[in-house]
Amino acid sequence: MNHTPIAFIAPADYVHTAAWVHALSLAMPEQSIVALSEMDTESRQRCTVAILANPDPADLQRLPQLRWVHSVWAGVEKLVADLGETSLPIVRLVDPQLARTMAEAVLAYTLYLHRDMPAYARQQAQRQWQAQEYVRAESRTVSVLGLGALGSAAARQLSDAGFRVCGWSQSLNQIPGIESFTGQSGLSAMLQKTDILVCLLPLTPQTRGLLGAEAFSLLRDRAALINFSRGAIVNDADLKAALDSGRLRHAVLDVFEVEPLPSTEWHWGHPSVTVLPHCSAPTARESASAIVANNIRRYMEDGIIPVGVNFSRGY
C-alpha cells in the first residue's frame, strides 16, 4: 500500500462519506483513502492528492502539500466558484455510465412529454376519459442544448427513438443523424424548429440566464422544456410567465437555483411543471470510483496530473 494518504473531503453533514471512502478503497486498494476528519496532523502534512464532493473550501487549506484534486461530480461550477482564484488543478469526473444514465432520463421524460402524460394526469384527477391526438415521433423535433459527453449520448438515444433531433454547442459538434448548430444565430435557428428543448449545458457566465423570454418566444408554439443541467441557466420569472401564458405547455425541472427546492416555491403547485429532486443522472459510486482510481494510479506512476478544468470556460 502507498502510505501517502489521499484525503476524501466532503461537507461535515454529508451522509455518504463512509460509502465513498469504502468504494474508493475497493477501487484502489494500494492507496490509503481517509476522510479528512479522520486524518491526523502528520497525514494532512503529507497528503498531495484529495478527492472532493463539494467540500468547504477552508478544508483544503488544511492540506498544505496539496498538488491537485479530483471531484467525484461531473459538474464542478460550484466547486470552482467556492475555491475562487486558485492555481490548484481540479479534475472533474467524466464517466460513460453517467452519460448512459442521463440519456435514459432524457429519453424517459421526452416520451413523457411526447405522449402527453401531464395531460392524462390532469384528466385522471378530473375523472375525464379522453384520448389525446397522437403525434408520431418523426413529427417532433427535440433539441439538445449542450453536445458534450452527456448531450451527445442523449441526442443519439433520441434519434434512435425516431425523433428529429437537433443539437447546439459552443463549438460545432457533428454527430451523424443530428442537425448541429453553434453560435448565437445557430441557437436562434434551432430554437425556431424545436418542440421539446432539453438543456444539458454547463453553468458558465455565458450560459447563466440563457433561457429566458427571448429564447422561449422563439420556440414552436406549445413547446416544452426539460432542464437537467443547472437551475440558473433558466430565468425563473420568464419561465413562469411562459407557462402561465401557455407559450410553453410544460416544463420538467430537475435542477433549481436553490436546492432542495423550498416548499414555498411556485414550481411545486404549478399545473404545468414536473418537479424532480435532482435525480436525472446520479453518480454511480462504483464506476466513478474506478475512474478516479485509474486517474490517480496513472499520476502515481508518471507524475502527470490528468487534464483538469478549464477555468476560463468554467468546466
Image (cartoon, grey):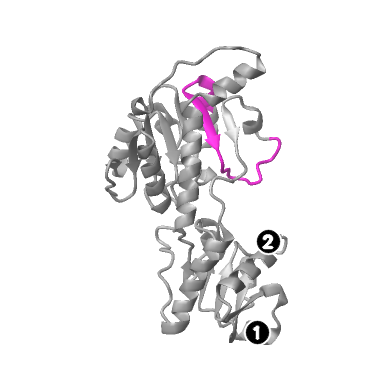
Mark 2, Cα crowd under 10 Å, few <14 / some 14-19 / many 20+, is few
Dot 2: what SS? loop
The reply to whether residue 138 is in sight is yes
Residue 53 screen position, x and y as percent: 60, 63
Q: Nearer the viewer, mark 2 or mark 1?
A: 2
Across and down, in percent, residue 38 comes to 72, 76
Q: Position of residue 305 (x, y in %)?
A: 43, 76
| Mark 2, residue position | 16
Q: Considering only order in the chain, which callout, 1 or 2, is on the residue closer to the N terminus?
A: 2
Identify whether 158 is placed above or below 308.
above
314 left or right, relative to 252: left
* 104 or 226, nearer to the observer: 104
Viewer-proximal residue among 53 and 26: 26
In the rendered view, tell whether residue 25 sits above or below residue 195.
below
Query: Mark 1 sits on what residue?
Result: 43
Q: How many marks?
A: 2
Q: Residue at 52% of width from left, 27% of height from top?
A: 250
Task: Give the residues in magenta.
Answer: 241-264
Question: Quick one: quadrant of the N terminus?
Answer: bottom right
